[in-house]
Amino acid sequence: MKKLRFSNPISSNTVILTTRPPVIQRLLSLQFTTSATQSSLGDSEISEEGEDASCIVQEKDYLRKSKDSGTGLYVLDLVDRGSLEPDPALYNKLLKKCTQLGKLKEGKIVHSHFLNSKFRADLFIQNTILNMYSKCGSLEDAQNTFDEMPMKDMVTWTALITGYSQNDRAEDALALFPQMLELGLKPNQFTFASLLKASGAAPSDNPGRQVHAFCIKYGCDSNVFVGSSLLDMYARCGRMEEAQSVFYGILSKNEVSWNALIAGHARKGEGEDALRMFWKMQRENFSPTHFTYSSVFSACASIGALEQGKWVHAHMIKSGGKLIAFMGNTLLDMYAKSGSIEDARKVFDRLENRDVVSWNSMLTGCAQHGLGNETVRRFEEMLRIGVEPNEITFLCVLTACSHRGLLSEGQYYFDLMRKYKVEPKVEHYVTIVDLLGRAGLLDQADRFIKEMPIEPTAAIWGALLGACRMHGKMELGAFAAERVFELDPHDSGPHVLLSNIYASAGRWSDAAQVRKMMKEGGVKKEPACSWVEIMNAVHTFVANDDAHPQREEIRRMWEKISEKIKEVGYVPDTSHVLLFVDQREREEKLQYHSEKLALAFAVLNTPPGSTIQIKKNIRMCGDCHSAIKFVSKVMERRIIDALRSSLEASIFLAIEMSCKTMFEQVDASFQKGMVEHTTEAQQQFVSTHSPLALSLRVEAPLDPTKELSRLASEYKFEETFTGALKRSDVSSVS
């Protein structure tokens, strides 16, 4: 038999084996046939007629297993039998297929066969093997391949650097760069992109700045590929000014550049800046991608901008965007954090593929809204359909049980973690201490802390301290406070809690001593504030606020509301005024808390019967909570108070930080404190947390419900969508 190797096969993914002359002629005549004709040659069958069989090996047969022991791959068996002429292109195709499909085992077989071939010194194929191991996550094999290569070029070094960078081994990736430079090799744009990705995971921006200097030295800093990586690196290091500087220095921006900057603002909690860049991106005729929308939804969630989030949701629908997994999860998260749990439910119900991230997002939303029973029900449903829970899932469920006082359920789910081999972390222990504390089992909570297998942290002792404040346990509270002071002396929350415990017990000198200790230690309490979103603008209030343009109307409205709710049974709870003053002055101090001013403003500026959503950076005092319930009843308005205490903030922050690989974001930190007073610090807080302002109202003037109604008519959405719009259920569309 005479063996031939065709240099111009039927297609780039087809290998032809030599055969008898008549068959050869027939195959040669097919070289210019259409792809439809080629496909008719057979699906996965490789026909054989003895030693001289005609064979066509298609791409799908590259990794076909051996029929007998052989090498393990049928194509390589053909090479060993002499039926197929090997060449570097064949090994390259096989290795690329292994890389694409993540077939590490098959890749090792090809590698072993290549080393026994006459092409084993081919640098191009060696680099392909190194890249295959890196992409498949086998960094040990990649490093061994690298070490055994007699010759290395810039592609070799870049492949290994990229492998370490993409597999979260930033230090190893960065350590290779100086070694590469010592050999006189010149890095290219792909080298720098991988190095900058690794630099973004470093604890500081020092490595990134050094890589940036080399980008400038080699003239790659203005390259859009490198520039996008540069600004992403600075954004991940929290250096947004530098990120913006790099962004505006990119000569030819693309969607990746815009996405990197928007994601950076969203990740840092700078929601207003992210939204402004989103509007600007569209004005410059760049089309948002799924990654853009995901970042913008995260930005809206960080500032609680529900109406802005609805507008972006409408824009996504108009652009033809679909609720693919990660974008649907961030949309769900946005609605939940912005106070619209109903819309979050609708998004969740419309997700095509609900993974553990989707379930965790829904569970977190229910927990944040105090829906403990629904959280438990959904968790049980999740287990029933076979979705494996992780540490975040259990943290959500335990938090929900803590908020709703579901003591036995919380203890059961904590024990259930062992069944799913989930190791409890600090956050899980915090929720159990909080659960026991809220139930009044303070001695049991104290014993639980002492018996924990880990050292108690400030957060754990802080949970016990909060429970002592709730139940007036002064001695145990003072003990817990001392432990917190030792572990985190700069946190103002525990100091304020201890001061309030003493004040509630009438021990004013001890309360004053704690305040003095705060002053001497430079510990400052962040001011309390509340805010509402009206007509695409966020309005922020502090206690006794006199800076708002409608301050007189707001005060008169609250006085009017106060009279009405007193008629139906509201009695001011002056126990929440921890000042040594008479009863009348205590009642006056309660009247103009920030949440009451925000509520009065919302009543003034929203249609009767509409839902009012108030957000607050600390836990609402008991009197305000009681007053708002009376207002809701008297005025027949649904009032959502999206509030979190210092402890709750730390728990939800832990959930968000744990989800960062899925959402690439961190929610805006909630400020801490317990007693409201008008101070210069409060005024500074208001100035730095200004409303979205006129710029957003000018740039996003559309009402989301009207816009979606227009879209429903224009694009003929499904019947259920139109019906939902009539009820203003904007998020029911996906």
Image (cartoon, rainbow, N blue to C red):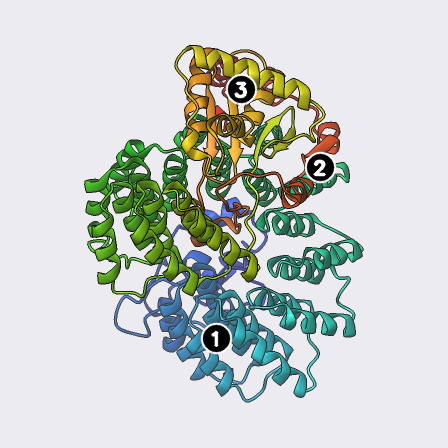
Question: Which image quadrant: the N terminus?
Answer: bottom left
* Res. 717 mark: 3
Residue 601 lies, in percent from the top left, at: 61, 22
Q: Earlier in the sequence, mark 3 or mark 1?
A: 1
Q: In screen coordinates, is 633 left or right of 549?
A: left
Judging by the rendered image, the residue that carries numbered circle 2 is 279
Q: Quadrant of residue 550?
A: top right
Horizontal arrangement in the rendering, residue 719 relative to residue 181 (left or right): left
Q: Position of residue 515 (x, y in %)?
A: 50, 52
Tell me residue 494's x, y (percent): 43, 52
Q: Secondary structure at mark 3?
A: loop
Which is more N-terminal, label 2 or label 3?
A: 2
Q: Position of residue 11 (x, y in %)?
A: 55, 57
Q: Earlier in the sequence, mark 1 or mark 2?
A: 1
User: Can residue 305 be seen at all in this image of the molecule?
Assistant: yes
Q: Which residue is identified by label 1?
A: 86
Q: Nearer the viewer, mark 1 or mark 2?
A: 2
User: Looking at the picture, which amino acid does disc 2 mark?
Assistant: Trp
Residue 706 seen in the current view: no
Q: Nearer the viewer, residue 586 or 392?
A: 586
